Amino acid sequence: MSIKVIVAGFKGKMGSTAVNMVKGDQELELVALLDPFADEKEVDGVPVFTAKEALIGFEADVWVDFTMPKVAYENTRFALENGFAPVVGTTGFTEDQIAELIALSKEKGLGGLIAPNFAIGAILLMEFAAKASKYFPDLEIIELHHDKKKDAPSGTAVKTAELIREARSYKKQGAEDEEESIAGARGAEFDGFRIHSVRLPGLVAHQEVIFGAQGEGLTLRHDSYDRISFMSGVNLGIKEVVKRDQLVYGLEQLL
Amino acid sequence: MSIKVIVAGFKGKMGSTAVNMVKGDQELELVALLDPFADEKEVDGVPVFTAKEALIGFEADVWVDFTMPKVAYENTRFALENGFAPVVGTTGFTEDQIAELIALSKEKGLGGLIAPNFAIGAILLMEFAAKASKYFPDLEIIELHHDKKKDAPSGTAVKTAELIREARSYKKQGAEDEEESIAGARGAEFDGFRIHSVRLPGLVAHQEVIFGAQGEGLTLRHDSYDRISFMSGVNLGIKEVVKRDQLVYGLEQLL
Amino acid sequence: MSIKVIVAGFKGKMGSTAVNMVKGDQELELVALLDPFADEKEVDGVPVFTAKEALIGFEADVWVDFTMPKVAYENTRFALENGFAPVVGTTGFTEDQIAELIALSKEKGLGGLIAPNFAIGAILLMEFAAKASKYFPDLEIIELHHDKKKDAPSGTAVKTAELIREARSYKKQGAEDEEESIAGARGAEFDGFRIHSVRLPGLVAHQEVIFGAQGEGLTLRHDSYDRISFMSGVNLGIKEVVKRDQLVYGLEQLL
Amino acid sequence: MSIKVIVAGFKGKMGSTAVNMVKGDQELELVALLDPFADEKEVDGVPVFTAKEALIGFEADVWVDFTMPKVAYENTRFALENGFAPVVGTTGFTEDQIAELIALSKEKGLGGLIAPNFAIGAILLMEFAAKASKYFPDLEIIELHHDKKKDAPSGTAVKTAELIREARSYKKQGAEDEEESIAGARGAEFDGFRIHSVRLPGLVAHQEVIFGAQGEGLTLRHDSYDRISFMSGVNLGIKEVVKRDQLVYGLEQLL
């Protein structure tokens, strides 16, 4: 039997991508669409609503939410109270709100997921890198992005570095007497290791973590080309929350 | 306080490499050397023995064994019976022997490790690849070795493929109507995915697992240049077995 | 002073991409558009024509042609006869036609370019690979494409292999006694070396040539993500043909 | 007929590696060895000399020289005057000395080679990178070495960057408003592009030049593991100098 899915925020970029993903998976059934900006009454036979209250009593399993920070908390509460397991990609929840929603999900015995990042590949890379750093404390991160990117290192690289810092024992890498003949050659220092930021036209978002040890090397690389890559994370979330009885924060909790 | 280590089989390649590793780590102390082929009475102040019986009652914590299959089982038994936690890199144990040695270790309350492969990097690669294949069922393996290698695919690639087969749902990859204009272009088929074997002078032993999904890619690569790389696994084994109370089979059990 | 450019076939995919490229380069000036399927009279102030004859006597330097095989030959003749240096991406010219157009270009003292491939990166990769193979006869090609691709190896890989065959002295690579435990592991054999075809979702069109020798390795890789990459070749063609006095076949002639 | 080779400085590391290379190539014949530090009278039937004067009138084609800066100039002069085409890997020649030796070689009608770098792969990489930078002005260099290396960027990276600067039109890369949240992330700036230096145990000497453009990328990588890699350059030098009638400086002159 297929999982019945509501998509809230279906007029936005992520929402409409999620609609296509749900339609393309035979294990899922799209049963309702919600967006205050919608004009249409239905899309390919699926009913469209502009206010969540119209969905009280509706028969569905999962509430996918790609709306806006200011409504996401209320939407998630509403979903749990009405028996829909929420899968939420909207950001901006406070820690208190998350704690409260987890408590509510337990009370209702419903699974749920709030995830700031749905890219399974990026999350696996971080997890693998953190684990490898326990055994290979010598590492460097190279992140590569398009040349319009303003900040360096990238947010993902900093997040990866923080997870490595938690797992790895501190080590100041490199030769003790090393010298840069041109400033910056050795990259940005973070917890004794280095991060290098490459910016070139044609690139999208890529990250490599290189580990070195006597006689061997280990390299982990993630390439991200398109937001469609987030959909495998959303798909996984939908299929996992229906098996669970409480909401979790972070896609890594489901991997 | 340092961990006192005996090295059995210290005249062999792996044994002598292990001796250097132990000497180079301040947390470890080399207390005895064993080898039936030894002529010397001591090496740098460390006593040398040619028969294991001479070590009954000797004070040591760990028994590192890089001997030969025909004596390794007896040696491991001897180590456990005399209070030394064994770390054994010799291969050729039967399943019955392993079960019996595990039982004996529990009885004695001693940790221990028998490992066919001490390359932490290679083991991590396999573990990561198997996990990633759950979420990214589309993958190919490229293994690269020196051009004197006779067999293709490599044993490590086949082992990796087997672990992926266990973790991944079967999928026949590639276009349904794909055709090779030159036979072999698409590589070796294994469980619906492909393995490619590259052989070139200058290479040693390398393996890459490439995962692809809509809009993203994940690549895991291990490079092995020298047997010295096995020593980080032996080192880890020594430090872990002294904290444990039963023998395990496979370095992955300690990661 | 800017180069005045006519784009023929501007309603097609390549033609419209070329229009944007010309508009975005301050050294170029778009002066006319031609397409029999055009309805509009002008686009952003640039006059639109539906028949080439209307351009007789028009003032322009270069005729960019992304039309169809059946008209491209006539168009190129027309351009040369009317003083426009042709840059032609349409395929399907016979050898006789090319020879005739080269002769005509000499007579008129006009430069020109007919190119089956405008991807500078792919052409450089082939040139570099052929040159390197003179000194490093041990090599393998790995080409990687999306998983809807039907043929393996790719046309680009075969073209690259042919250019290597011309430059390299024949050598049968690999161990003499090598054996495949799974058929196809060693890839497709071409002139004694191997080609491997990887097919995965998320990939577009990529090619790697790996050279190995005692103690070293050389790797050349080209990644192609989008047809926009052809535009740097068209741009180069436009700027080169105005400096020359005869037509050439193949972008490599201008590198 | 084989090429008769004298090796001067055969007791040193490079010299003895060269001896093995000459012996292993059927097109070459080792006819004499020279080293002031030699005690032996012959090695495997090849006569050994301790002073170059003993080789006046000796029958040989090529003089391979891996001696020391203070004698290399005199040795090269001596070789040319006695009819041996020199292949010299010793460094420290002044520009005046090189000019003088070239003049002498022309007078004698003898080929010759003085090369500060015999790594064909590294030289090809530099040449390819410089050429590609004409068409792809957006690039970054990543060089990777063992973690005992003191200087960053490496000498090879700086040499490569200088050759690129000569070939490429100046361009300041990256976003205009780019900011480093950790200093050094964007690497060392050289002529508007960036160089990143990675230092890890297990690495030897590696260099990657990455080019990016709209919709495509080109990556060139050289890996150097062992000094044996220089021997293909020496081998090439020996076979080329016998066909030429004047000395050249730099192996790139023969590629």
Image (cartoon, coloured by chain):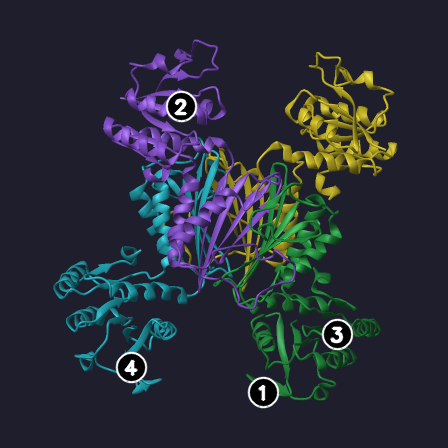
Chain colours: A cyan, B purple, C green, D yellow
Nearest the eye: B158 or B127: B158
Whole-angstrom CA distance, mark 3 to mark 4, is 54 Å
In the image, residue C40 sits, relative to residue C144, either above or below, namely below
For mark 4, what is the residue? A37
For mark 2, what is the residue? B24
- The image quadrant that residue B183 belongs to is bottom right
Label 1: chain letter: C
Q: Quadrant of the C terminus of chain A?
A: bottom left
Whole-angstrom CA distance, mark 1 to mark 4, is 37 Å
Secondary structure, mark 3, is loop
Mark 2 Cα shell of 10 Å, populated few (<14), some (14-19), many (≥20): few
For mark 1, what is the residue? C42
- For image coordinates 84% across by 72% down, the residue present is C103
Label 2: chain letter: B
Where is residue C213 shown, x and y percent of the image?
64, 40
- Say if labels 3 and 2 share a chain: no
Q: In the image, which is nearer the foreground, mark 3 or mark 1?
A: 3
